[in-house]
Structures are given as structure tokens and as C-alpha cells.
Amino acid sequence: MTKILFVCHGNICRSPAAEFVLKDMLCRAGLKDEFRVESAATSTEEIGNPVYPPMRRVLSAHGLDCTGKTARQIRRSDYESFDLLIGMDEENLWNMRRIFHGDPEGKLHNLLEYAGRPHDAIADPWYTRDFEQTWLDVNEGCQGLLAELTGTVLLDFSLCADIPALYQEMREKMAWEDWYGENLDALYDVLTGLQHRGSRFVVTVPREDAPPEVRLYFTRILRVFRDAGVEWIEEKS
């Protein structure tokens, strides 16, 4: 079992958001029993408090229930208990190194490094008041972390209104190179040899009210997945 601890300053906004986002992704990928995911604070300011209401509302709007989660501070023993300790910004990492007396086993990471942004911080809504941006940052980081650890990529076609939108979702989530084409032959080439992110996929189907050409093209995409020999899980929107 892989054990992951997300860490931010107070453990009432960013790190619990990451905890519940990743738990949801792992559940959708059928991998929840292979991971233990928690979150904690570097400070003592919010110990025992629940997730901050505006953050809780954003999570709820995306179908995530964080009921029962309360803030706790990291302990020195967490360094031995967890395989990865992932901060939301450089200050979190600095405080973890102070508490853990360094990082001798290389367990400390910045969440957005898994999104190819190693020096960026997850937007702190305590100051920005933009809780939706925090959700977007956390989701991007957790998508990259999931792919890094399991090879799984979540492709959400539920809101795609046209065929270019289907390709945009794959290009962004699978990290296609800019020069890759956007057609079924190019998709097959990506899946069978060209550099990309992901070896298995969780695919959210287009909505029932999506244009017929989108739904038809989606079935062609899945046929390419099958022909390329990749694994996918299909879920309804």
C-alpha cells in the first residue's frame, strides 16, 4: 500500500481538498484499496477545525463529501509512516524540512511538480478567496500524481460539445506533444508508441444530450483504444 500525506499551512483548505480529490480519483480508477491518503497542517492554528466552509462547498459542488475531516498537525513520525509527503507551496516544504530535520529519503514534494510546474504554488484561497481556482490547481496536480503513481489518466468527455473538444481533452490530460495531429490515426500512434501520459484510462462518456456526431466519434475513440490494446474504465457522466 502506498501512503500519501498532503500538507498545507492550516489543513482546512488546500491539503484536505487534495486528500478528497485524490481519494475520488483512486476510487474511480478502482485503486482505492492500494492507497492510504490523508492530510495535515504544518501549524497549530486550525487543529480540530473542519474543512473551511467555502472550500467544503466547492468540493460538494464537484460531488465530494469531506464530512468528518478535521485539521491535525504533522508529527515527526509521519515521515516514517508515509511514502510521500506533498506540500502545496514552498513554505509548506520548508516547514516540513524543519519539523522532519531534513528529507533524507526524498519523500517531500510540491503537488504541482506532478503537473510539470515544480516551482508553482497551489493558489491559497485563504488570501485569494478564489476557491474554484484552488480546485483547478489541486485537480491538475492530483491528475499528474495519479498518472505518475499508477499510469491512470482520467478523460472527461462529458461536457465536450464538438469533436475538437474531444481531442483537446485528450491532448491536455495525456500530455500530447504540440505537433501530434488530431485524428484517429494520430491517436493510435500516440497510444502505441509516441510519448504521452497514461497507460490506462478512466473515460467519462459524453452526455446523452451531446451532439450525435460527438457521441458517434466517442465510440470510434474507444475502438482505437481497444485496437491499441490499452485498458480503460468507462463511466457515465
Image (spheres, grey):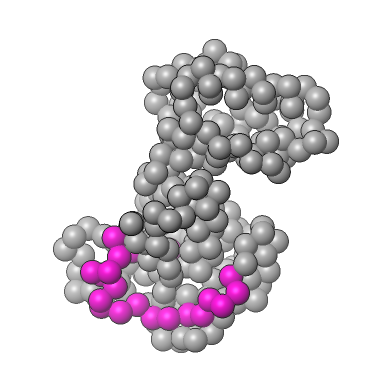
Q: Considering the whole magenta stretch, tell me its main secondary structure.
A: loop
In the foreground, 176 or 2:
2
Q: Is residue 201 left or right of residue 34?
A: right
Question: Residue 68 lies in magenta, yes or no?
Answer: yes
Q: What residue is at 42 percent from the left and 49 percent from the top?
A: 145
| Residue for point 58% across, 54% down | 136
Examine the rendered structure and indicate whether residue 219 appears above or below residue 93: above
Question: Of 30 and 42, which appears nearest the observer?
Answer: 30
Is 175 on the left-hand or right-hand side of 62?
Answer: left
**Which image quadrant is residue 52 in?**
bottom right
- Residue 88 visible? The answer is yes
Against 97, residue 107 (above or below) is above
Give the camera-side residue of 123 and 214: 214
Residue 6 visible in rendering: no
At x 45%, y 59%, the residue is 121
The answer to whether residue 75 is above or below residue 133 is below
Q: Quadrant of the C terminus?
A: top right
Q: Residue furthest left?
A: 104
Residue at 69 percent across and 41 percent down: it is 236
Instruction: Count the marks.
Output: 0
Can you give x and y, in whole percent of width and height, for residue 168 in the image? 61, 31
Q: Nearer the viewer, residue 188 or 2?
A: 2
* The stretch drawn in magenta includes residue 190: no
Which segment is the magenta one? 66-90
Residue 21, quarter of the rendered image:
bottom right
Q: Quadrant of the N terminus?
A: bottom left
Rendered location of residue 25, percent (x, y): 52, 51
Pinpoint residue 201: horizontal percent, then vertical percent: 51, 36
